[in-house]
Amino acid sequence: MKIIMLGAPGAGKGTQAKKIADKYQIPHVSTGDIFRANIKNGTELGKKAKTYMDAGQLVPDELTVDLLMDRISQADCANGYVLDGFPRTIPQAECLEKALSGRNDAVDFAINVEVPDENIVARMSGRRACPACGATYHIVHIPTKVEGICDRCGGELALRDDDKPETVKNRLSVYHTQTKPLIQFYGDKKVLHEVDGTQEMEKVFADIVKVLGE
Ligand code: AP5
Ligand code: MG
């Protein structure tokens, strides 16, 4: 099962992709998480990616496409995967399509998690992430048991560098110009499914399971 998560920054792609990965036992592949891991480890790729990410811009396709292709060619992806944050541009989607069609394969589901811009800024400013294990929370909607401390590993939670309101505005505008056209792209391929991402998290997931099957 090859699944793509579409949606604005903060729509809940990562939250839902983790649940999908758990239920269907497929890897959760997030280009954003891969870049953040590289930044944390101080790699050359991380240094390059950080300048774009902190400005709310997309990391150039040259740095992103090979990285993703390499990841999905690993053995654990043989039975499928859920892509979160890729593709983000039409050229990225075309590269993925080309790579898959070379193996007589294609994306099975593109799930668009729909959340209006008005809700996004509030979500992002309330998001807290654990730099140690990658778990994400929300100070109002998904609180931790102890404030500021990760339920899963006990790490200290932090606000993501690109969740400052000014950067969020840039990310939203980049989303509308560069990423939103993918809705039409996957609609044309007849694999697009829309879910209402403003609902409570478990309800969003239930709607996704209706699409993917039990
Ligand atoms: P990336 O990490 O992919 O960020 P993003 O798309 O901006 O998405 P987010 O991770 O911010 O949001 P999300 O949809 O995952 O929401 P979440 O589940 O956390 O990318 C970061 C940067 O990396 C990009 O800006 C770009 O520079 C670069 N990049 C990455 N991929 C790239 C690519 N392919 N090409 C080029 N550049 C690339 O939820 C958000 C918050 O809301 C959380 O606090 C969560 O707890 C809460 N929440 C979730 N669901 C609900 C709900 N139903 N109700 C209430 N609250 C909820
Ligand atoms: Mg995410």
Image (cartoon, rainbow, N blue to C red):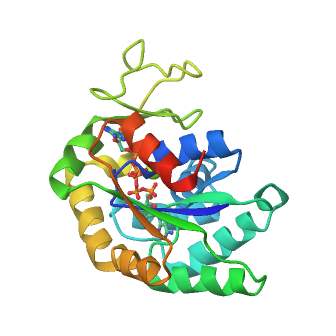
Q: Residue at x 39, y 43 (%)?
A: 204
- Side of 193 relative to 21 (left or right): left
What is the quadrant of the N terminus in the image? Answer: bottom right
- Give residue 55's position: percent from left, percent from top: 33, 64
- Give residue 138's position: percent from left, percent from top: 34, 31
Q: Residue at x 53, y 80 (%)?
A: 92
Viewer-nearest residue: 170 or 14: 14
- Give residue 93's position: percent from left, percent from top: 53, 80
Q: Residue at x 67, y 46 (%)?
A: 24
**Residue 65 sits in which quadrant?**
bottom right
Viewer-nearest residue: 130 or 122: 122
Considering only vertical position in the picture, is 116 above or below 51?
above
Considering only vertical position in the picture, is 26 above or below 147?
below
What is the quadrant of the C terminus in the image? Answer: top right
- Side of 70 relative to 186 (left or right): right
Considering only vertical position in the picture, is 182 above or below 129?
below
- Give residue 200's position: percent from left, percent from top: 32, 35
Farthest residue to the right: give it: 75
**Residue 9 sits in which quadrant?**
bottom left
